Amino acid sequence: MSKIVLDEKEVNELMDTFDFQKSIYLQELQKITGVINKLDEIQKTQKDITNKLDSYTAILNKFNFKNEQELTANYSSYLAFLSKKIDDLLKNENLKKLEKILDKTDYIVNLSVFKVAVIVAVITTG
C-alpha cells in the first residue's frame, strides 16, 4: 500500500474544493445519527411506559380481589357511592358547576369501567 503525501497548501486546496454535502460517509453518518435519535426517543418512551405500568400494577395489587364476585361487589359499592353523590349534586342550584361535576363523574365512571375490565382480564389470565 502506498502513501500519498500532501503539503499544507494542497491539503487546504483539497478541503476548499471538497463538497461535504455529497460525501457518502457524511450522509451515512447523518442517517445513523437520525436512527440513534429515534432509538433514544423510543427508549425514553419505553421507560415512561414501564414506570406507568409499575405504578398501575402496584395499584392493582392493593385491590387483591379473591374472585370475580368480590370484584363485582366492590365495584357495585363504588357505583352506588357515585350515584349517591350525583343525587346530592343534582340538588345544587348552580347548574354550571353541576354540569362540570357531572362531566367529571361520567369520565370517572368510564375510567372505572375500563379499570374493572382490565382487572377482570388480569385475574382471568393470571
Image: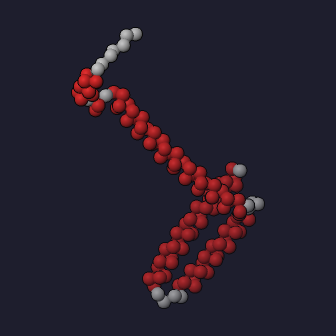
- At 52% from the left edge and 49% from the top edge, which residue is drawn? 44
Placement of the N terminus among the 4 image quadrants: top left
Residue 120 lies in quadrant: bottom right
- At 51% from the left edge and 49% from the top edge, which residue is drawn? 45
Q: Is residue 82 left or right of residue 3?
A: right
- How far across and down, in percent of the image, does residue 116 sit? 63, 62
Q: Which one is nearer the viewer's eye here, 14 or 65? A: 14
Q: Residue furthest top?
A: 1
- At 47% from the left edge and 46% from the top edge, which residue is drawn? 41
- How far across and down, in percent of the image, does residue 24 sit? 33, 27
Render colour scheme: secondary structure
- At 48% from the left edge and 89% from the top edge, which residue is drawn? 93
- How far across and down, in percent of the image, does residue 30 sit? 37, 35
Q: Which one is nearer the viewer's eye here, 49 or 102? A: 49
Residue 80 lies in quadrant: bottom right
Q: Which one is nearer the viewer's eye here, 110 or 44? A: 44
- On the question of residue 105 being in view, the answer is yes
Q: How many numbered marks, from 0 up?
A: 0
- On the question of residue 68 being in view, the answer is no
In this rendering, the answer to whether 102 lies above or below 22 is: below
Q: Is residue 41 left or right of residue 23?
A: right
Q: Residue furthest bottom?
A: 93
In this rendering, the answer to whether 11 lies above or below 59 is: above
- How far across and down, in percent of the image, does residue 108 sit? 56, 69
Q: Residue furthest right?
A: 66
Q: Residue furthest front?
A: 8
Q: Which one is nearer the viewer's eye here, 66 or 59? A: 59
